Image (cartoon, rainbow, N blue to C red):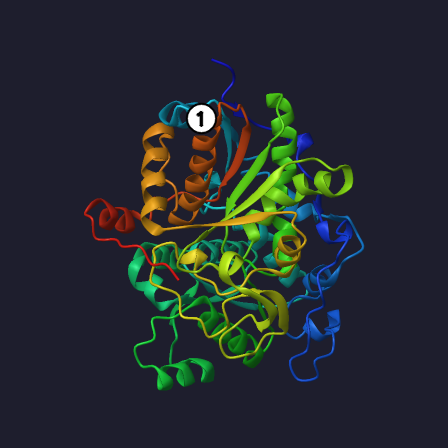
Amino acid sequence: MEQKRFFLKEADLPKQWYNIQADMVNKPMPLLNPATKQPIKAEDLYPLFAQELSRQELNQTDRWIDIPEKVQEMYRYYRSTPLVRAYGLEKAIGTPANIYFKNESVSPVGSHKLNSALAQAYYCKQEGVTNVTTETGAGQWGAALSYAASLFGLEAAVYQVKISYEQKPYRRSIMQVFGAQVIPSPSMTTRAGKDILTRDPNHQGSLGTAISEAVELARMTPNCKYTLGSVLSHVSLHQTVIGLEAEKQMEMAGEYPDMVIACFGGGSNFGGISFPFMRHKILEGKKTRFIAAEPASCPKLTKGKFEYDFGDETGYTPLLPMFTLGHNFKPANIHAGGLRYHGAGVIVSQLLKDGLMEAVDINQLESFKAGCLFAKAEGIIPAPESCHAIAATIREAIKCKEAGEKKTILFNLSGHGLVDMGAYDQYLAGNLVDYTL
């Protein structure tokens, strides 16, 4: 059998992040100040985000942005992550397709989220910030931010979507081990949370409610900044280390992907693996397909409308030009908590409008069936979010089988599911159902 795993030497690790906005023919439309409806300037974001992150958010001119040496040093503890040829999955499907996955589950916190958490914590520390706040759905981002904050000596407060707080107690424990304060959202600790609970005392929470609370706390707390794990452009920027590594690793494997697939909540891991490959489509006309796999219960890319909308439920954030189901959308209580977000990042929204990528929606039962098949074939139990990417990959591999086509498929395994076993228990017991919008 040919080589199965591909790693990069330390000298070959990325030293810059890739900013796809510089290469886009149609740049994303500007973020708007909700009060004035005027385009946001970087300094308008300074009260909320670290200044360098604010500048990165709006940077549409610099193709490459240097990764600070301290962040590079921390990346080296777990990067490069392996590119793996999924021989077991190929055999289980009986497909002629060659399937590869980028295994981001090997990071210290078990997901890709650390790639941006380290960068955001670094920039906050450089600015003299002492406290950070954030939201989290399933808890992968909350765990990553809590760990990064502890490394840089920052106090972290995490608002976790209430249904996930209850469904995934061990994610909460992980954050607390790293020293973070974890609050189920909506809560009575903020004006936004109180207003939501007054309107709906049984509200199970959404990423929109948790963002509102985290943003409010950041505004009200001295020397505190808000951080987030997806949706915004600077987060996707940091995640491009995934795709930049995968490019070199696919070259080592002697292949180039016909398809790049990732699950989709707000866009961080999809952008992370796909944007470096997509630059060759934009600049050189490569024919690679880019497929975002979202839950059928929260399908902003396949069923949402492109319009300006808030990133949170209360309306604290700038107005974002994005595919959205509406900032008041209440997602079903699926176990892929990281994908239960009402909107898509502005870069991905523009790329979808321009036909440079496509989206599919996946039902909950199909995703868990795919995750179980992958686990048996490859020995890794995937996070419920990642199961959506696996399900989309299996769909494409079956099409290759039916057409007798030998395509190369690359997908991102964004995290493991070892603290999501309650969800697998429910699936195996037949207690999960599909929710379709």
Q: Residue furthest left?
A: 429
**Residue 176 or residue 385, whichever sits in front:** 385
Q: Quadrant of residue 416?
A: top left
Q: Is residue 119 left or right of residue 110?
A: right
Q: Is residue 227 left or right of residue 89?
A: right
Q: Is residue 161 above or below residue 234?
A: below
Few, some or many residues within 10 Å of mark 1 (<14, 14–19, 20+)? some
Q: Is residue 75 visible?
A: no
Q: Residue furthest right?
A: 61
Tell me the kind of residue under disc 1.
Answer: Lys
Quadrant the C terminus occupies: bottom left
Q: Is residue 130 above or below residue 15?
A: below
Q: Which residue is depicted at the point 33% across and 34% down?
A: 373
Q: Is residue 125 left or right of residue 42?
A: left
Q: Quadrant of residue 370?
A: top left
Q: Is residue 11 visible?
A: yes
Q: Which residue is depicted at the point 42% across and 35% down?
A: 394
Q: Point out residue 344 in the picture as x, y percentages from the top left corner.
A: 56, 60
Q: Point out residue 418 in the picture as x, y percentages from the top left corner.
A: 34, 44
**Residue 94 or residue 380, whichever sits in front:** 94
Number of numbered discs overlaid on the protein picture: 1
Residue bearing mark 1: 401
Q: Point out residue 237 in the picture as x, y percentages from the top left corner.
A: 66, 52
Q: Residue furthest top?
A: 1
Q: Residue furthest front?
A: 403
Assign a secondary structure to mark 1: helix
**Residue 267 or residue 355, whichever sits in front:** 355
Q: Point out residue 61 in the picture as x, y percentages from the top left corner.
A: 80, 55
